[in-house]
């Protein structure tokens, strides 16, 4: 409860500060009054067009024809290693706010990008829930050269006005490594637009409206609290086949480290620029591009979303470590707890073993993550039921190792019982999300006060990929935008690596990367055990002797008799240096010395004559004095 209360207090403080800053924006009073929504209500065809439900007419028959997507060799010189078949079946479930025209529903088409290849479905006119038939242009076949490539799918609303660009509805990105080799998937994938906190809430709460019609899922009473900003979902049928059985896929996490920036080559025509902009959105989101991953419109709401997500991610990582420690203490996994006890006891006399055990436990935790066995939120309650087969990462650590060694094995189809179990599991998770959202709203309104934490006493070209400039620019009339926008960019820059770490620890987005890291942890652990057993005492002995000799050298250097002579030599050098500096300060350019030399040369004879005369006078005076 301590972390939850702290997170709630921190979010409320951030929201209060942002609301104060946002109230300084004078343009808030000049914003629109929702004329488009009013026109929609007056449209007599609104009820018909906005409730056109293609969900009931989904054509699940095999596609009549797969379009071959060709990528030029000069844009992808590496040879192909696999085949990906993608079928776009249906889409829908997005909110009516900001989507569609005032007098008609959406004219939808899907854009599919994979490893430099681009494919586009035909347009479904006036469809809130577009569904493509088996005879439509909906099925595409890609030959991929990069086993670590990502499948991008975007949904757009075609605009008949040639001046206006097509409106983006949502996008999704799925790594090919998330699919088991050789298996055919038929699933709904959530769409995002701005990747806001409310869109994430809609994705997590989608199971609550699974029995609602897609056309009205976001506005139904069941989804009104969680689906207000939903961008819907898209149904895809995907099959990934690898020529070598998946060995290249198993190594993609390592070979992908040297992979360059992904981009799509489009002609420099007007339609080519429009396609390039649609490809940019499909691959990177609302404003990001290969040259600026944190480019997005300025908004105080986005600053708050990023701050909330950053708080959740950091505290989630801390809470995950705490839960795993408590899991070991409470013997949720007896074998793992005994292993931790052995690690503790064997590390007391040799601290190097402790590091080896930490690497080993980290690798085992990642292996458990890939198996779908995660630590429950409350470890004092009944143990949580393991994740269902569908909700688990599609490639376990053992399956990844087998794929790396001998290739992928056949995957059994999902049974109806497993599908029902996954639906119930997802609905339970969605209900927990909805309850947590309601509690956050109550805490913000003051209806529920956060429990006080007891403190223990004691001590404690804008369009060109080659221009290296952002491909899209955003302006803002907010007077504080120049000061707050850097904060927004900084928060997003912090979020990007944390999102990657969360995906790596989750395992479902890229099980290959998680398996690779788990194997690296186990290898490092084995190496550390060998070091601790055979080399640590020698290294300790060598370090001890080195420290001892270094101590002697330091003592001799600080207190040795050589300092007596060194200090005096240094003092003499310093005096000479001061004398030279004084001369340089008196006559830095040497003009006085030159004048003295010229005077001496010009008046040398005269000076010698004066000297002789002076000597004669002195001699004469001495002689006169002697005579007297």
Image: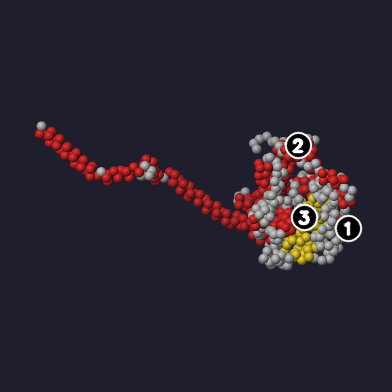
- Which one is earlier in the sequence, the residue at label 2 or at label 3? 3
Which residue was labeled with disc 2? 451
Which residue was labeled with disc 1? 57
Rendering coords of residue 535 (x, y %): 57, 56
The residue drawn where x is 68% and y is 64% is 76
The residue drawn where x is 38% and y is 44% is 589
Colour approach in the figure: secondary structure
Give the camera-side residue of 435 and 297: 297
Front tag of 1 and 2: 1
Q: For the residue carrying disc 2, how many other residues have a C-alpha within 10 Å: few (<14), some (14-19), or many (20+)? A: few
Which residue was labeled with disc 3? 162
In this view, which residue lies farthest toward the top? 628
Rendering coords of residue 575 (x, y %): 37, 42
Q: Is residue 510 visible?
A: no
Q: Secondary structure at mark 3?
A: loop
Query: Where is residue 572, by image quadrant?
Result: top left
Quadrant where the N terminus is found in the figure: top right
């Amino acid at each position: 409860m301590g972390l939850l209360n702290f997170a709630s207090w921190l979010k409320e403080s951030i929201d209060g500060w942002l609301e104060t800053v946002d109230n300084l924006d004078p343009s808030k009073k000049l914003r629109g009054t929702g004329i488009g929504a009013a026109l929609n209500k007056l449209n007599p065809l609104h009820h018909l067009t906005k409730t056109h439900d293609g969900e009931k007419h989904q054509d699940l028959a095999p596609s009549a024809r797969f379009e071959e997507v060709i990528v030029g060799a000069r844009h992808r010189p590496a040879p192909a290693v696999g085949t990906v078949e993608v079928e776009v079946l249906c889409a829908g479930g997005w909110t009516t706010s900001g989507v569609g025209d005032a007098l008609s529903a959406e004219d939808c088409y899907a854009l599919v990008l994979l490893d430099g290849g681009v494919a586009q479905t035909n347009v479904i006119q006036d469809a809130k829930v577009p569904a493509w038939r088996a005879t439509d242009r909906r099925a595409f076949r890609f030959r991929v050269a990069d086993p670590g490539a990502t499948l991008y799918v975007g949904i757009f609303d075609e605009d008949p006005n040639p001046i206006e660009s097509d409106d983006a509805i949502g996008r999704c990105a799925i790594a090919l490594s998330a699919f088991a080799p050789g298996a055919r998937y038929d699933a709904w994938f959530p769409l995002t637009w701005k990747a806001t906190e409310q869109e994430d809430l809609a994705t997590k709460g989608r199971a609550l409206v699974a029995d609602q019609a897609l056309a009205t899922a976001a506005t139904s009473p069941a989804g009104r609290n969680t689906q207000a900003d939903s961008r819907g979902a898209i149904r895809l049928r995907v099959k990934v086949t690898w020529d070598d059985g998946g060995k290249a896929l198993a190594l993609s996490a390592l070979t992908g480290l040297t992979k360059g920036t992904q981009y799509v080559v489009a002609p420099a025509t007007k339609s080519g620029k429009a396609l390039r902009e649609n490809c940019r959105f499909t691959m990177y989101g609302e404003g990001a591009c290969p040259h600026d991953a944190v480019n997005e419109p300025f908004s105080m709401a986005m600053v708050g979303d990023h701050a909330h997500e950053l708080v959740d991610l950091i505290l989630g990582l801390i809470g995950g470590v705490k839960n795993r420690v408590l899991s070991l203490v409470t013997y949720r996994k007896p074998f793992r707890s005994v292993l931790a006890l052995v690690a503790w006891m064997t590390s007391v006399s040799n601290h190097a073993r402790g590091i080896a055990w930490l690497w080993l436990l980290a690798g085992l935790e990642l292996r458990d993550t890939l198996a779908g066995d995660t630590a429950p939120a409350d470890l004092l309650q009944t143990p949580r039921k393991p994740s269902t087969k569908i909700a688990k990462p599609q490639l376990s650590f053992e399956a990844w190792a087998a794929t790396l060694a001998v290739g992928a094995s056949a995957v059994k189809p999902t049974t109806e019982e497993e599908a029902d179990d996954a639906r119930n599991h997802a609905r339970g998770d969605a209900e927990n999300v909805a309850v947590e959202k309601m509690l956050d709203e109550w805490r913000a309104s003051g209806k529920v006060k956060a429990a006080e934490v007891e403190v223990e006493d004691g001590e404690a070209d804008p369009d060109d990929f080659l221009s290296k400039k952002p491909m899209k620019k955003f302006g803002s009339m907010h007077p504080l935008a120049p000061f707050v926008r850097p904060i927004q960019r900084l928060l997003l820059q912090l979020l990007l690596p944390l999102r990657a770490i969360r995906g790596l620890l989750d395992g479902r987005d890229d099980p290959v990367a998680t398996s690779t890291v788990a194997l690296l942890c186990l290898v490092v652990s084995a190496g550390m055990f060998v070091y601790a057993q055979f080399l640590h005492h020698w290294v300790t002995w060598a370090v001890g002797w080195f420290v001892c000799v270094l101590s002697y050298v330091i003592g001799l250097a600080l207190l040795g008799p050589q300092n007596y002579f060194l200090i005096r030599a240094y003092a003499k050098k310093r005096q000479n240096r001061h004398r030279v500096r004084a001369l340089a300060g008196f006559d830095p350019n040497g003009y006085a010395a030159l004048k003295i030399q010229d005077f001496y040369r010009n008046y040398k004879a005269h000076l010698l004559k004066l000297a002789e005369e002076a000597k004669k006078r002195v001699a004469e005076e001495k002689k006169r004095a002697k005579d007297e």
